[in-house]
């Protein structure tokens, strides 16, 4: 429950969902956030909410004096794409969890999410480049790997020979 979670770490509530920093067995801290679920093309408010997930997570990371932050693809992952009946986590059906026979979660479209994420991280680094050493976007799905490889140069161009590389990396 949220009440028991709130005893584990410091958090803040607002746009970008619940943010909670908890200790983890091999990491200094894990920041939890809840992103938007988009039905089709994301609305401007859903784009803002997804961006806020990253910005608020980075704010909490700085409060915890973290130098490296690794992000999953918030709101796009396999857990947001469950369709139909059958057993899920903890051996319960969606009907047992959500009180109806079928449920359909639609995750945030991967391509649209990548644009929001990369734009958010780029803009955040413009103002905070000396506050972190590294930002990492972790991808689970092959299509996310392809999307980020395609879009990264637009937001984080590689310096030409003879130019000084940027001090912050994604």
Image (cartoon, rainbow, N blue to C red):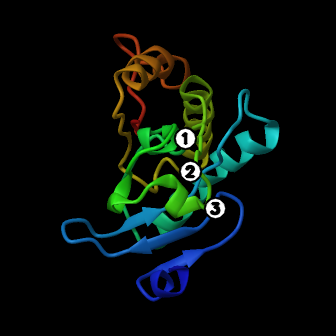
> Of tags 2 and 1, which is closer to the observer?
2
Asked where in the image residue 126 lies, by quadrant, the reply is top right
SS class, disc 3:
loop
Q: Which residue is mark 3?
A: 17
Q: Residue at x 19, y 66 (%)?
A: 26
The furthest residue to the left: 26
Residue 87: image x %, image y %?
38, 50
- Determine the secondary structure under disc 1: helix
Q: Is residue 152 at least partly visible in the picture? A: yes
Q: Position of residue 165 (x, y in %)?
A: 38, 26
Mark 3: few, some, or many residues within 10 Å (few <14, many ≥20)?
some
The picture places residue 102, in percent across and down from the top left corner, at 58, 45
Q: CA distance from mark 2 to mark 1?
A: 8 Å
**Residue pointed to by mark 2:** 54
Residue occupying image coordinates x 37% and y 63%: 66
Q: Are marks 3 and 2 in contact (CB under 8 Å)?
A: no
Q: Is residue 117 left or right of residue 14?
A: left
Q: Residue furthest front?
A: 101
Of pointers 1 and 3, the one earlier in the residue sequence: 3
Q: Earlier in the sequence, mark 2 or mark 1?
A: 2
In the image, residue 135 above or below residue 13: above
**For the view shown, which residue lies furthest in the right direction?**
44
Closer to the camera: disc 3 or disc 2? 3
Residue designated by label 1 = 121
Give the foreground label among 1 and 3.
3
Q: Is residue 49 above or below residue 112?
A: below
| In the foreground, 103 or 62 | 103
Say whether marks 2 and 1 touch (CB < 8 Å): yes
Q: Quadrant of the C terminus?
A: top left
Q: Is residue 67 visible?
A: no
On the image, the x and y values in percent for residue 63 come to: 49, 72
């Amino acid at each position: 429950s949220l009440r028991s979670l709130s005893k584990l770490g410091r958090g803040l509530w607002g746009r970008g969902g619940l943010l909670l920093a908890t200790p983890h067995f091999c990491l200094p801290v894990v920041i939890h956030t809840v992103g938007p679920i988009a039905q089709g093309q994301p609305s401007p408010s859903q784009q803002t909410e997804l961006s806020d997930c990253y910005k608020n997570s980075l704010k909490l990371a700085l409060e915890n004096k973290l130098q490296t932050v690794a992000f999953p693809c918030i709101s796009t992952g396999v857990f947001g794409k469950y369709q139909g009946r059958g057993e899920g986590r903890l051996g319960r059906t969606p009907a047992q969890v959500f009180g109806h026979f079928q449920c359909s979660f639609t995750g945030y479209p991967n391509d649209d999410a990548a644009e929001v994420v990369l734009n958010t991280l780029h803009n955040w680094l413009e103002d905070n480049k000396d506050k972190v050493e590294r930002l990492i976007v972790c991808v689970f799905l092959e299509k996310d790997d392809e999307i980020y490889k395609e879009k990264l140069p637009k937001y984080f161009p590689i310096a030409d020979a003879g130019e000084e590389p940027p001090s912050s990396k994604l």
